[in-house]
């Protein structure tokens, strides 16, 4: 497959205006049925039917249960094509004249009118920056380090990457439209790129017409159009459509430690002791392929693991979850239990000659489970369940699921016993594996929330797994690119994601390692991972000074775990974003443009990070959106609506808290991972000029199981106010289904008391001086004693 070539409209036939009728259109004398349905709340589905596409082959799990009564405007006519907009407003997206829908054999395409003011985002996992104007791209899961030249993945932007979600966000002023292609083939998007010949020179004059179109080489045409109108509303609608992320186990939000080379109990025991020695909290110890016997999935190498159940239990009794890697490839070995079982069940992919498809990955000659078959998924789920139950494993790492096939041509890998071509399921392979793995984990531990991490995926993957952004490299290029990659993947329906820190390949300097941690310590997923061909890069390997800096930010993550966890609570319930661009929360203005800010981001609604991304620099320009911001480096309030220049110390990073924020934190400076969600500090960030009420809903549960779905959670709503220089906090909603809540109130001003109102009770709460370490020097604050609510 050519990654840098896509279909072009000149090779397609399109209907004339007279050939577009209600529910039908004719192209080249061939009749097609079309259907435009309003699913509610400004979400529309456009489908075209014809016998050349007899079935919908997409396994994306889409929830179309929107409010059908909500007003919206979308129409299809011969004269105007498809027109999408807000009720009573101007069109936000419309067809390019004469290019409503085109066909070329099995391929189809939709063209749209281009406006230079448009901005484009999303597109799932793409490495070519935050804003996507003038890009063309294809959606096809790749094994990046195997499929691209080394210089491309080290210093460039390989495309396509590991994970395919054909979802485009179109920005029109401060209004947003989403376009989701529900098609598993190698769909494509063109966003008015320059027409260049051999990537050396622009095409001749006259060949620069706007080229804004989407399409696919095969598969039933089905496109969802979503009207925000804001980016926040649009993102919530997309999450509801593709599925929100289930509430994860709390340990999955902690720091994770991994290395290709950890192979034994002795390795993990050594790493755990080092974390304890240096007082660095950590929740997960990960095993790459070396823990297995000959890289055979579902095995433990007896040389390194004498008693896996006992040894894993020992590590987990210390608070370290053990997370093994599962690759889909099964060694072709008649004596190997997984191969024998799969062969007997007849669940391996086929080749065109009728035999089992054979690839060449870590175990050597390898066959692959067919996740397109229900029985294939069931077989895999049972293998997972048996393996994780025997060793009390509650998390797994799904790798090589692009699917990577090594030297073998992957187009010869056929599905559904040879009846489904490779291109129809290639992008969905990882989704099938994740779903089967999730079901296996649930079967083994029905009362434990599983945690799965995947390399590859497809639309709705977030229902089952988090994603890391693939094998990256320890250099400034990858550090800078980690932010836009993570943001766009989050906007595309995968909020639980993050890069490997401080880069998988290469040799990070101490300064680069510190910069990675200062940038990524609040990413939804935080894992230190390295390649066995390079030096170890655990936090203590970079020298004492750098270790102290890294430790500070890992501890700060643990201090903020109650806040991060509650972001996931709201994601599951309503599709609220976690990591988000400034555009999500603030309007773009000519005086302070935000449309290309790709080195800052919001963590939930209250925190903004602006890390220094050059290991050799200590200064940068920071955009402060409208409002007031508390500078967590220096403990002062700053006016927003402007750019400021900041200078940092080696152990500091710019972090800002929004005026009116109420932020739950873990007490003290956490040196371990023993986070108790029922014991918190509530930090009240109300500037001297703050008006109105700051409202926050805090949720606590056991961070482990599904009891919260049965009401076993504590949920308390706080309202904080500042009136005539005095602070008051009112508890306006209380549900103590998981037990009483222990709260200490923290404020960053010189006040000796706040008033607490809970029910009919009212009392003064004394505040005494305290110091808080966030991202810079110690900050002066006032803290209350612990108050127990719901006793």
Image: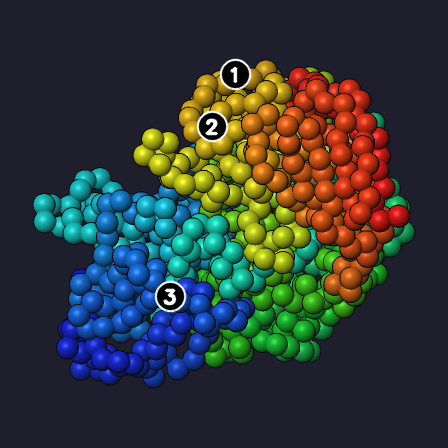
**Left or right relative to 118: residue 714:** right
Residue at the spot 15% in from the left edge and 73% down from the top edge: 16
Residue at the spot 76% in from the left edge and 59% down from the top edge: 708
The residue labelled by disc 3 is: 72
**Numbered tag placed on residue 640 in the rendering:** 2
Image quadrant assignment for residue 548: top right
Instruction: Tell me the crowding category of disc 1: few under 14, some 14 to 19, or many 20 or more residues within 10 angstroms, Cα based.
Output: some
* Res 387 seen here: no
Circle 2/circle 1 CB separation < 8 Å: no
Q: CA distance from mark 3 to mark 1?
A: 48 Å
Q: CA distance from mark 2 to mark 1?
A: 18 Å
The residue labelled by disc 1 is: 647
The spot of residue 33 in percent (x, y) is 30, 81
Residue lying farthest to the left in this orientation: 205
| Element assignment for label 3 | loop
Quick check: 254 above or below 461?
Answer: above
Between 70 and 495, the one nearer to me in the picture: 70
Instruction: Tell me the crowding category of disc 2: few under 14, some 14 to 19, or many 20 or more residues within 10 angstroms, Cα based.
Output: some
The spot of residue 259 in percent (x, y) is 68, 39
Image quadrant assignment for residue 74: bottom left
Between 478 and 622, the one nearer to me in the picture: 622
| Element assignment for label 2 | loop
Q: Earlier in the sequence, mark 3 or mark 1?
A: 3
The spot of residue 491 in percent (x, y) is 48, 50
Q: Earlier in the sequence, mark 2 or mark 1?
A: 2
Circle 3/circle 1 CB separation < 8 Å: no
Q: Earlier in the sequence, mark 3 or mark 2?
A: 3
Quick check: 656 above or below 97?
Answer: above
* Res 426 seen here: yes
């Amino acid at each position: 497959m050519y990654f840098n070539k896509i279909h072009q409209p000149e090779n397609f036939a399109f209907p004339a205006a007279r050939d577009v009728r209600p529910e039908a259109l004719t192209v080249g004398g061939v009749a097609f049925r079309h259907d435009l349905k309003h699913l509610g709340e400004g979400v529309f589905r456009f489908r075209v039917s014809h016998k050349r596409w007899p079935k919908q082959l997409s396994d994306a799990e889409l929830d179309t249960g929107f409010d059908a009564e909500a007003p919206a405007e979308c129409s299809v006519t011969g004269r105007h094509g498809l027109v999408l907009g807000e009720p009573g407003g101007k069109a936000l997206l419309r067809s390019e004249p004469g290019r409503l829908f085109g066909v070329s054999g099995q391929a189809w395409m939709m063209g749209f009118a281009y406006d230079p003011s448009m901005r484009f985002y999303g597109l799932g996992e793409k490495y070519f920056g935050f804003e996507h104007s003038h890009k063309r791209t294809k959606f096809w899961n790749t094994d990046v380090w195997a499929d691209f030249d080394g210089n491309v993945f080290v210093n460039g932007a390989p495309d396509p990457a590991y994970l395919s979600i054909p979802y485009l966000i179109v920005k029109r002023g401060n209004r947003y439209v989403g376009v989701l292609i529900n098609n598993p083939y190698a769909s494509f998007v063109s966003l008015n790129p320059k027409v260049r010949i051999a990537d050396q020179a622009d095409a001749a004059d006259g060949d620069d017409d706007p080229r804004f179109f989407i399409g696919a080489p095969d598969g039933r045409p089905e496109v969802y159009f979503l009207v925000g109108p804001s980016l926040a509303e649009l993102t919530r609608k997309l999450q509801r459509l593709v599925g929100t992320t289930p509430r994860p186990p709390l340990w999955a939000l902690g720091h994770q430690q991994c290395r290709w080379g950890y192979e034994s109990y002795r390795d993990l025991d050594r790493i755990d002791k080092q974390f304890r020695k240096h007082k660095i909290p950590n929740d997960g110890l990960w095993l790459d392929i070396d823990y297995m016997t000959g890289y055979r999935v579902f095995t433990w190498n007896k040389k390194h693991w004498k008693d896996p159940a006992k040894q894993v239990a020992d590590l987990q009794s210390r608070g370290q979850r053990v997370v093994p890697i599962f690759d889909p490839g099964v060694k072709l070995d008649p004596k190997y239990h997984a191969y024998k079982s799969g062969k007997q069940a007849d669940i391996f992919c086929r080749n065109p000659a009728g035999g089992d498809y054979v690839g060449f990955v870590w175990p050597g000659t390898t066959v692959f489970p067919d996740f397109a078959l229900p029985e294939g998924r069931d077989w895999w789920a049972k293998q997972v369940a048996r393996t994780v139950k025997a060793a009390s494993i509650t998390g797994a790492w799904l790798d090589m699921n692009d699917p990577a096939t090594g030297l073998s041509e992957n187009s010869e890998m056929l599905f559904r016993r040879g009846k489904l071509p490779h291109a129809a399921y290639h992008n969905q392979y990882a989704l099938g594996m994740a779903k089967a793995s999730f079901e296996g984990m649930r079967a083994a531990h029905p009362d434990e929330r599983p945690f799965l991490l995947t390399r590859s995926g497809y639309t709705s993957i977030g229902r089952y797994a988090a994603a890391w952004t693939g094998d990256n490299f320890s250099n400034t290029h990858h550090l800078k690119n980690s932010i836009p990659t993570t943001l766009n993947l989050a906007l595309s329906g995968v909020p639980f994601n993050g890069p490997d820190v401080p880069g998988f390949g290469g040799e990070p300097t101490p300064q680069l390692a510190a910069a990675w941690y200062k940038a990524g310590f609040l990413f939804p997923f935080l894992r230190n991972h390295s390649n066995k061909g390079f030096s170890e890069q655990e936090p203590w390997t970079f020298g004492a000074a750098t270790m102290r800096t890294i430790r500070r930010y890992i501890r700060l993550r643990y201090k903020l775990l109650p806040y991060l966890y509650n972001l996931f609570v709201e994601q599951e319930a309503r599709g609220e974003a976690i990591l988000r661009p400034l555009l999500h929360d603030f309007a773009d203005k000519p005086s302070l443009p935000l449309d290309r800010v790709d080195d800052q981001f919001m963590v939930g609604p209250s925190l903004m990070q602006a890390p220094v991304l050059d290991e050799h620099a200590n200064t940068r320009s920071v955009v402060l959106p409208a409002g007031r911001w508390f500078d967590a480096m220096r403990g002062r309030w700053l006016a927003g609506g402007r750019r400021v220049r900041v200078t940092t110390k080696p152990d500091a990073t710019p972090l800002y808290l929004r005026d009116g924020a109420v932020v739950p934190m873990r007490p003290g400076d956490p040196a371990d991972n023993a986070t108790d969600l029922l014991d918190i500090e509530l930090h009240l960030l109300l500037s001297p000029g703050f008006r109105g009420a700051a409202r926050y809903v805090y949720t606590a549960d056991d961070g482990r199981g599904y009891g919260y779905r049965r009401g076993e959670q504590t949920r308390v709503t706080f309202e904080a106010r500042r009136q005539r220089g005095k602070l008051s906090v009112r508890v306006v909603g209380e549900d103590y289904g998981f037990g009483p809540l222990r709260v200490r109130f923290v404020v960053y001003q010189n006040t000796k008391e706040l008033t607490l109102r809970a029910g009919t009770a009212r009392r003064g709460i004394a505040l005494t001086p305290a110091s808080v370490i966030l991202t810079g020097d110690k900050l002066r604050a006032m803290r209350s004693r612990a108050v127990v609510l719901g006793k």
